Amino acid sequence: MDVPVLDMTGKQVGTFAIDEESLGGVVNPDLIKQAYVRYHANRRQGSARTKSRGMSEGSTRKLYRQKGTGHARMGAARTNIRRGGGRAFAKTKTREDYRLDMPVKMRRKANRNALLAKLMDQEIRVVDDLSLATPKTREFRAVLEAFGVDRSCLIAVGPENTNVRLACRNLDRVTLTHASQLTCFELLNHRYVLISRADLEAWLEASSGTSKGGKSRLSSKQREEAA
């Protein structure tokens, strides 16, 4: 698959060849959904709380006598059947755990598969050199218009790219993320993805690694010697 490489004005200056088989070959919706649900569940804090009958504020006095009033039998105002009363089955746990687990290889494959789906829909904008001389939001807005970005967009840049990070953080429907931390959750939450060619190459190399972290087992010195 040949992906167009654009400059900052939106003109094509080359192509970037990506092996579809390294991204899974075909889109696997079931795998992507499983990974997406996992990422979504693991973001939950589990800190929701409700008050039981004993924790809610109010008197414990019986509102009126049991018989002779013509009304239904009624006890205290804090009972769970009255407005403002406590909950019958209140959430009182200190921390509820919603975390889901998934094998590392499946996670990495789901991330690559989500990237394949984006590439097939032509929603990835690969930039030859994603950089700005000054951190101006107006200039970066013009860049997005040149790329045809009219919906939500995910900007994947490295921490050293300060000008781009400062310029895009105040734009509507634009999310900033670290280029090495692209996941299927972030990819599917946005219509477009903007990333530089160098960052995409580094992500593809890291996500196809053999260690549990999804990176090469070689040290930096060994990688330099191999190069």
Image: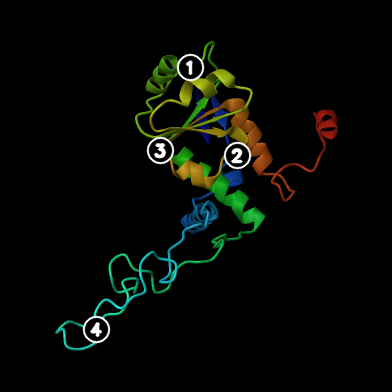
For label 1, count other residues whose C-alpha is less than 10 Å away and answer few (under 14), some (14-19) or many (20+). Answer: some
Instruction: Report the front residue among 16 and 173.
Output: 173
For label 2, count other residues whose C-alpha is less than 10 Å away and answer few (under 14), some (14-19) or many (20+). Answer: few
Q: Which mark is residue 181?
A: 2
List x then y, in percent, for residue 209.
Answer: 71, 44
Which residue appears at 58% of the width and 36% of the height? 18
Which sits earlier in the primary sequence, circle 2 or circle 4? 4
User: Label 4, label 1: how many angstroms apart (C-alpha)?
Assistant: 79 Å
Q: Is residue 116 visible?
A: no
Corner quadrant of residue 68: bottom left
Which sits earlier in the primary sequence, circle 4 or circle 1? 1
Amino acid type indicated by mark 4: Arg
User: Label 1, label 2: how many angstroms apart (C-alpha)?
Assistant: 23 Å
User: Label 3, label 1: how many angstroms apart (C-alpha)?
Assistant: 19 Å
**Where 198 falls versus 81 (above or below)?**
above
Q: How many marks?
A: 4
Do the numbered discs 2 and 4 sit on residues whose CB atoms are within 8 Å? no
Secondary structure under tag 1 reads loop
Colour scheme employed for the rendering of this structure: rainbow
Looking at the rendering, in which quadrant would you find the C terminus?
top right
- Give the residue number, with chain letter if any, for mark 3: 191
